[in-house]
Image: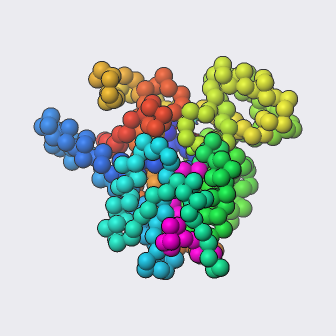
Amino acid sequence: MFQRNADGSPVLKQIEINTISASFGGLASRTPAVHRHVLNVLSKTKEAAKILSNNPSKGLAQGITKAWELYGSANALVLLIAQEKERNIFDQRAIENELLAQNIHVIRRRFEDVSEKGSLDQDRRLFMDGQEVAVVYFRDGYMPSQYSVQNWEARLLLERSCAIKCPDIATQLAGTKKVQQELSRMGVLEMLLPGQPETVARLRATFAGLYSLDMGEEGDQAITEALAAPSQFVLKPQREGGGNNLYGEEMVQALEHLKDSEERASYILMEKIEPEPFGNCLLRPGSPVRVVQCISELGIFGVYVRQGKTLVMNKHVGHLLRTKAIEHADGGVAAGVAVLDNPYPVA
Ligand code: ADP
Ligand code: MG
């Protein structure tokens, strides 16, 4: 999100990093054409030409293709782990279609299907319905409620296999809010990026305040500060998918309830970012089209492929702009709050 520094200069502040099931790469590849079309209908051809091209689905598919090539078996498939009731299937299909264009076939299965029909051979090669799997791409498995005992077993089977996982369990955990908070501690970036003080400084400039709530003095102080100025903080559990963070009075109540219990360590506290609102129309079914005060959130899609300790691919492949009315503190597109948008460069 964009925020203003004390001196008025704009700065991009990081909300979080997602390392599993990052969505809307497919749909974000289609929205530039929608906005260009709308502007062209209004005869605003110059403005239409300014809408940035964007094709994250192609870039995400390139990452999966690279992993598939590294696996090295011409007949092996990509296994997309899908939810039982998937509302976002068209987003996923865009990536599947890019893979199919490379002659890489994708099968969609649920965790339950894996536990019933998945198996490993003696070399830990993964087979699903008798077909060898090169890459497992998770679009499920990022919330505790998605893991029954049976689903945990399926995840363990996938994890133990020599198929390439997008992501493996370590990479998924690296995306947790707790890790994000620990990365912001003084000295941690310096340790991970030795001899690169400029990179460290540029990265740190994007961090908002992040505070551990572990038992002890540091956590006690963070709680005292949040209770003294609730509007400046967000309380975050280790959850994904939107709608889990606590703000304002709800945050105060939760902190009062948690402060003497070890349970508080399963949350982190974050400084609330205050982006500047602007007027925009949110087009959604059943709502009148009118200008309301909005804020936007920019996402960057990254592809990272690693083989053992060798980095094979690490690049950005597109962006996602989501815009929502200012009255919603939390919640993204899937939660029905934000809409897909496009940046409009003015300089
Ligand atoms: P999730 O992983 O569940 O999506 P996030 O940390 O991304 O959780 O938060 C969800 C939404 O809440 C974000 O998209 C953003 O709109 C809002 N949000 C999260 N953290 C902050 C913050 N520190 N300041 C302002 N808004 C925030
Ligand atoms: Mg997230």
Q: Residue at left 34%, top 71%?
A: 102
Q: Is residue 284 above or below residue 188?
A: above
Q: Where the C terminus falls, by quadrant? A: top left
Can residue 136 be seen by looking at this rendering?
yes
Is 183 above or below relative to 253? Answer: below
**Residue 305 location in percent, x, y?**
53, 68
Q: Quadrant of ligand 2?
A: top right
Q: What residue span does the magenta drawing correspond to? A: 124-141
Q: Position of residue 133 (x, y in %)?
A: 51, 70
Residue 331: within the magenta? no
The secondary structure that dominates the magenta segment is strand
**Residue at left 70%, top 59%?**
190
Total numbered circles = 0
Of 273 and 109, nearer the camera is 109
- Which residue shows up at 34% across the image and 72% down it? 103
**Residue 135 location, x and y as percent?**
51, 68
For this rendering, which residue is in front, 7 or 68? 68
Residue 307 location (% of width, % of height):
58, 74
